Each structure stands twice: as C-alpha cells, then as structure tokens.
Image (cartoon, helix red, strand yellow):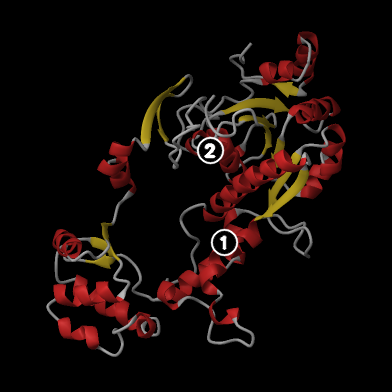
Amino acid sequence: MSGPLTGVRVLDLTTVVMGPYATQILADLGADVVKLEPPGGDVMRYAWPFRNPGMGHIFLNANRNKRSIVLDLKQDAAREACLALAKRADVLVYNIRPQAMARLKLAYEDVRAVNPRIIYVGCFGYSQRGPYAAKAAYDDLIQGAAGIPALLKVQGAETPRYAPIIVADRSVGQQVASAVSAALYYREKSGKGQRVDVPMYEHLLQIVLGEHLGGYTFEPQHGEPGYARMLAPDRRPYQTKDGYVCALIYNDKQWAAYFKVIGRPEMAADARFATQEVRSQHYDAAYAFVAAEMKKRTTAEWIESLEAADIPVQRMNSLADIVADPHLAATGFFRTVEHPSEGRIRTMAVPSEWSQSKPEYRRHAPRLGEHTREVLREAGYSADKIERLIASGAAGVPPGGDIS
C-alpha cells in the first residue's frame, strides 16, 4: 500500500493541462487513475519537444501514474463502455464544458444513474450560474479575464503580457485535486456522492484578488484597488554590477539592517521608511532606492552581505540553474527514470513529504491506449467484446500493441 488515496478509482476524461495536472496529483497520492482519451489522444501529447510523436514533454510531466484507454465517445458502444467504467469508479473528472458532456449523454444525471456514489467533478471556464457559463476558456483567456496582463502593465511592462507559466490551469488543477479529496472525505462520512464544479475564472480570482482587491475590500470604497507593494515598478530582481539578485527587505528589523549594510544607518529614521505602515504608503520610493543601491556591488557581494545581516536573499536562477541546483539534488527533487518507449527521462518528485502513506512513482506516462484491453477486462468485458470494440473503432490500442 502506497499513497493516502490507494484504493480510490478515478476516471479521467480531461485533456491539455488543468485536468491532467489535477488527476496526476491524485495519481501521485495513490489513486488508480484511468485516462480516457479520444482516438487522436490528448493534444498535449504533440507539444514539442518529444522523442517520439505522441509523447511530448508536457504530457510526460502531467500524466505519470495513470493508465490510458482509448474510446471514441461519439459512438454508442464507447459511451456504454465509459459508463461501465464510471460504474466502478469513485471519481469522474472532466474539463470540457458541461454542455458538451450533456451532448455526449455523460452529464451528472447520466453517470449518477449507474453510480449514485460517484463524485463527478467538472473543471471549466466559468460558473454555470452566470452569463459566461457556455464560454470556452483557456489559460491565456482566463489570465486576461482575471486581470493578470493588466496588472503587469500597471507594474511597468511596456505592453500587457501573460505570465510565462500556465498559471490558471495549474493553480486551478490544484484546487480540483483538493476538491476531490474533500468530496471523498465527505462521502466517507455521509455515504453520499455529489457533483462538484470548479470554475477557472472564479478560482483564479481568489488568487489575484486576495491582495489586489485593495480599497474595493471596503464599502464604501477606501482607497484604490491593487496591492501597492506588488505593483511597484522596481519590485523585480535587482540589477547588480554583474547580474541580478532577488532580495526582500520586508520588516522593520530588516530595513534597519539593510541601512547598516549600505553604511547609512540614519536612514532607519527616514519618514518614508521608518515603519511597516509608512513603507506600505511609499513602496515605489522604497524599491527604487534599493534598486539604485544594488547596482553598486556584485551579486556575490550582495548575497554575502545580506545573508550576514539576516536579510532574505536568493540568486536569480535560470531554468538551467534550477536543474543543477544543489538543494534539489540533495532532496532528490529530480529523478531519472527509464521509460519503456521514451528511454531515460527526468521526472519531478511529489512536492510533499509524508511519514506514512508515502506517494511514489508507480507508472510511466502511458502510450495512447496502452491499457485499453486491461481496463475493459476489469470493467467486466469479455475478450471477444473487447476485440469487437477495437475492430469497430469505438476503442483503440497503440500500433505496437497494448498491455495484454
């Protein structure tokens, strides 16, 4: 037995990043996740770089510990097979619009009819209670709707930009995994399954507006929206003589220590910088002052002097620096594994540590349809019926064969 969700069966109808990332978290925690893919497979299978078509790098990093089955849900026989899998599942997760699930006759009511205890989780763009209910949504669109590009422009970007990470999909994916875990706990206590909706827009707004609601927090409005510290133009890695360094001079003790480091201890009494409260009203000036000072020494000199003064500081890493990070080497964050079709690949550890029920790497990210026969057998299908499904195109297996 390994992982706190060992014994939980998840039917994963998700694609791209948000849903697969959520179900990988569940799989890492021990759940048996069956990834149901269309004949063409999850689109992320084809994101370059890859060694072999259909096994792209993003797919490999969002689908470990899962099994893959191919079903063409536009065919009645495949839909019947999907419901057979749902009947045995604890959780079904999907990330297309609910209207599309209804057209496939796989709405909550359809699935609940075969499994009243199912936890039916949808992650999609917007709450189904508002006028945006049927709108399509992707990470870029939700970032824009939640104001992230506009905030970057306010901070000083020449033009609005998206964050260069798939921030909406991945942050909401974590919320999906959390919701599934909570719903499983509720069912354990009550015996009741339920439908859970996790809309991207509303969940990303929880992250954005947690600090940027600002003066809109109060009725009537008291000040402007936005958290001034986050929006200060010089809140960024500081340029040094030979590179960049990330430092956060935050509380009164750290500011007093910083003024001593630069040989100007009297500035601790400056009316703009003396206390947390007044600094919160002069963040632009505070960060601009530090930015000018940081150009006077090298990165190594700043790291040495700031660490000696107990001021939080970190070298700015590139992606190459991260892969070579000695801390990550010591903790085993990166691990090289042998993938049966892709050869040696680098994988990341589960970013939590457990004294019991430790999560682990159990399965490689699957080839498309690698487990079709295996999963259908577990659902009670005979060998003849499985072969008929495959021959009809309702189900699929890899060209080189699946697990038999």
Which amino acid type corresponds to the residue marked 1 in the rendered image? Gln
Is residue 148 placed above or below 223 in the rendered structure? above
Which amino acid type corresponds to the residue marked 2 in the rendered image? Ala
Q: Quadrant of residue 189?
A: top right
| Label 1 crowd (10 A; few <14 / some 14-19 / many >=20) | many
User: At 46% across and 69% down in the image, what residue appears?
Assistant: 152
User: Which quarter of the figure is the N terminus placed in?
Assistant: top right
Q: Is residue 105 visible?
A: no
User: At 47% across and 28% down in the image, what residue appears?
Assistant: 361
Residue furthest to the front = 189
Number of numbered discs visible in the structure rendering: 2
Quick one: SS at disc 2?
A: loop
User: At 71% across and 47% down in the image, what residue appears?
Assistant: 122
Relative to the observer, which residue lies in front, 254 or 171? Answer: 254
Q: Residue 131, how many percent across, how many down?
A: 78, 65
Residue matched to label 2: 62
Q: Residue 105, how many percent across, how many down?
A: 85, 39
Q: CA distance from mark 1 to mark 2?
A: 21 Å
Relative to the observer, which residue lies in front, 346 or 7? Answer: 7
| Mark closest to the chain's N terminus, 1 or 2 | 2
Residue matched to label 1: 143
Give me the disc on residue 223: none
Q: Is residue 358 visible?
A: yes
User: At 20% across and 66% down in the image, what residue appears?
Assistant: 240
Relative to the observer, which residue lies in front, 165 or 281? Answer: 281
Q: Quadrant of residue 143?
A: bottom right
| Label 2 crowd (10 A; few <14 / some 14-19 / many >=20) | many
Relative to the observer, which residue lies in front, 274 or 399? Answer: 274
Residue furthest to the bottom = 271
Instruction: Please give left or right for residue 394 compared with residue 403 in the image.
Output: right
User: Which quarter of the figure is the C terminus placed in?
Assistant: top right
Instruction: Please give left or right for residue 26 compared with residue 153 in the image.
Output: right
